[in-house]
Image: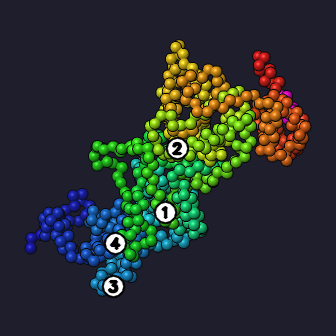
């Protein structure tokens, strides 16, 4: 036999003899020699001890069981890995219980024998990792390097969305070790959201920074639900909250008291909110001309769960891994669907899906006109103020006439979400008169009685440049049509004034405004303090004129009574004669409201009832101040 001597190129190791002159030939022969072995177990010498470096499974029966046990394990591909496993054997550690469950359910003797041999081989190798995981579950503490152990794909995990605790499902984990920086773990999580069309899965990532020594698992920014003592209560609470999320899909008009997260800022900003909001993801993406986010359909996840092996865990394991590096140049573009009609699919959610639902829904704050996320637990049905219309003080039958117009308009054209390009199908009501006599309140009371949103805006918020005014009007009119809302344009003098031959810029503004209103299909309230200067072309487009005059003593008395009743009659010590005296003071409705509010604030600390003296003092103070301003 011919032998060949191989010397160490570095001179550290002794020479060795082989019947192969080429190292590659020797390696190929070795692989051929062990190819029929069920498992090839490789060892390396470390500190004078032989330790496992890797092992490769060749047995077809063993491979079949491993393929079932490791199905859909994040980005792990058995074929690409050539069925070779290296320490710390993360996939097998995470699926150890599933592998054992498979063994218990096997009836075929040969298959049973193969998996028993596999388990007997794996047990001593995996023992340290399995023991460490058991210790973590017992103590509730973990070290940084072992963080991967508690995040098997499919595990339910608790994290926070804008400081609100939520349950997600682990999609994958990854340890990142930047050059010259401390390592950190990235845990990818999936949860259920609504994009205005359908529910589906989307992902988020949570970073666990490096830490020294053991740390409580539940102190991590994301941790498995099973480590919480109240896991069952948390689960039931999240399912209940998910049902609220389910009911809030589509369009909803609600009251919100709590916190909102602004959507149109570079970084998420938290703001307090107390008022009425409209929940509508479709409207957000549609009016902003934004492509709605892609969500992985619930149906695909349900199909994956149905196809899972009978012996698999209850939790579905989903592989939605993707690379940050594209395979080639991006040659396609996502198309923006400009269709006006809603296409919403409200499929029922299971309890497991409700558990994973986001606690935040998108909508518009009607007061500030800001798009934001609102917490589902902060939303409640609107308590309508049915007395608002009754408290509306207007001479004659003007308010009943306005209501009749609105009521019959709704009966004649209930075209929710239908954007017909016909002219003159809207209802325009122009309210004119001095300030503080109830023009704005009329629109509010009519909308309240109609049970619809009132989208109010002032001419000042629209600006003066025709291009921006047109865009802002388009958005407002679009939303009013989507939501069957009434539009209130307050102080619209700049858009209603008669056109001249000298001010071309304002002429363009008036023309834009007239055109938009002519094609508007809903109900629009306009207020102005200068009726005499209104453009004649606009006058012909008004369906109902509502004139307002300075309040008489009788109407002022009713206004005083109304605001005192709203503030709480028991807080005031005023007689009928006192009200008669107050009614003689020439104040408008807004001034009376402010006086009642001011008097109420002044009495909060003392708790004393508000008497005639305080109201008279506040009224005189206001009149003197206004007279002084007029004289300046």
Mark 3 highlights which residue?
107
- Quadrant in the picture for residue 592: top right
The span shown in magenta is 615-621
Mark 2 highlights which residue?
413
Q: Secondary structure at mark 2?
A: loop
Quote the CA–CA distance across marks 4 and 2: 60 Å
Closest to the camera, between mark 4 and mark 1, is 1
Q: Secondary structure at mark 4?
A: helix
Instruction: Indicate whether 197 appears above or below 408.
Output: below
Mark 4 highlights which residue?
68
Badge 3 or badge 1: first in the primary sequence? 3
> In this view of the protein, which residue sits in the foreground, 37 or 159?
159
Badge 3 or badge 4: first in the primary sequence? 4
Q: Residue at x 82, y 31 (%)?
A: 553
User: Is residue 140 covered in magenta?
Assistant: no
Q: Residue at x 52, y 48 (%)?
A: 280
Badge 2 or badge 3: first in the primary sequence? 3
């Amino acid at each position: 036999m011919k032998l060949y001597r191989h010397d160490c190129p570095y001179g550290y190791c002794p020479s060795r003899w082989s019947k192969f002159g080429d190292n590659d030939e020797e390696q190929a022969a070795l692989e051929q020699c062990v190819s029929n072995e069920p498992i090839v177990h490789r060892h390396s010498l470390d500190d004078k001890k032989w330790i496992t470096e890797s092992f490769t499974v060749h047995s077809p029966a063993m491979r079949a069981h491993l393929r079932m046990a490791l199905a859909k394990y994040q980005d792990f591909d058995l074929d690409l890995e050539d069925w070779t496993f290296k320490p710390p054997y993360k996939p097998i550690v995470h699926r150890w219980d599933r592998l054992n469950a498979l063994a218990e359910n096997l009836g075929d003797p040969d298959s049973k024998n193969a998996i028993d041999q596999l388990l007997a081989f794996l047990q001593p190798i995996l023992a340290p990792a399995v023991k460490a995981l058991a210790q973590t579950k017992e103590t509730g503490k973990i070290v940084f390097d072992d963080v991967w152990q508690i995040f098997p794909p499919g595990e339910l995990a608790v994290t926070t969305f804008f400081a609100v605790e939520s349950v997600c499902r682990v999609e994958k984990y990854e340890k990142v070790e930047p050059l010259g920086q401390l390592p950190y773990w990235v845990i990818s999580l999936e949860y259920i959201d609504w994009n205005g069309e359908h529910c589906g899965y989307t992902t988020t990532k949570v970073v666990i920074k490096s830490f020294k020594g053991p740390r409580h698992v539940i102190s991590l920014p994301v941790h498995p639900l099973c480590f919480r003592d109240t896991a069952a209560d948390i689960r039931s609470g999240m399912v209940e909250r998910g049902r609220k999320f389910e009911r809030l899909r589509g369009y909803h008009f609600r009251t919100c008291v709590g916190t909102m997260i602004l959507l149109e800022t570079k970084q998420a900003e938290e703001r307090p909110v107390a008022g009425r909001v409209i929940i509508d993801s479709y409207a957000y993406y549609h009016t902003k001309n934004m492509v709605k986010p892609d969500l992985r359909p619930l149906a695909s996840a349900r199909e994956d769960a149905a196809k899972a092996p009978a012996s698999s865990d209850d939790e579905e394991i989903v592989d939605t891994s993707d690379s940050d590096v594209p395979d080639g140049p991006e040659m396609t573009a996502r198309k923006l669907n400009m269709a006006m009609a809603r296409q919403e699919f409200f499929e029922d959610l299971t309890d497991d899906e409700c558990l994973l639902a986001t606690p935040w829904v998108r909508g518009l704050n009607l007061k500030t006109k800001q798009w934001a996320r609102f917490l589902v637990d902060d939303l409640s049905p609107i308590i309508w103020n049915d007395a608002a219309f009754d408290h509306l003080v207007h001479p004659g039958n003007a308010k009943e006439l306005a209501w009749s117009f609105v009521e019959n308009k709704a009966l004649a054209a209930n075209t929710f979400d239908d954007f017909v390009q016909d002219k003159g199908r809207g209802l325009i009501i122009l309210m004119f008169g001095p300030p503080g006599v109830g023009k704005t309140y009329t629109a509010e009371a009519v909308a309240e009685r109609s049970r619809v949103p009132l989208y109010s805006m002032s001419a000042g918020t629209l600006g003066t440049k025709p291009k921006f005014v047109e865009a802002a009007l388009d958005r407002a009119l679009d939303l009013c049509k989507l939501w069957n809302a009434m539009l209130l344009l307050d102080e619209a003098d700049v858009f209603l004034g008669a056109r001249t031959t000298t001010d071309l810029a304002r002429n363009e503004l008036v023309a834009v405004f007239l055109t938009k209103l002519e094609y508007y299909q809903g109900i629009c309230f306009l207020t102005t303090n200068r009726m005499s200067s209104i453009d004649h072309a606009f006058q012909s487009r008004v369906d109902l004129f509502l004139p307002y005059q300075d309040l008489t003593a009788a109407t002022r008395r009713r206004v005083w009574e109304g605001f005192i009743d709203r503030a709480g009659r028991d807080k005031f010590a005023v007689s009928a004669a006192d009200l008669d005296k107050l009614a003689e003071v020439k104040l408008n409705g807004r001034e009376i409201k402010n006086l009642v509010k001011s008097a109420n604030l002044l009495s909060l600390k003392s708790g004393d009832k508000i008497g005639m003296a305080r109201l008279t003092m506040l009224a005189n103070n206001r009149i003197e101040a206004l007279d002084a301003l007029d004289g300046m």
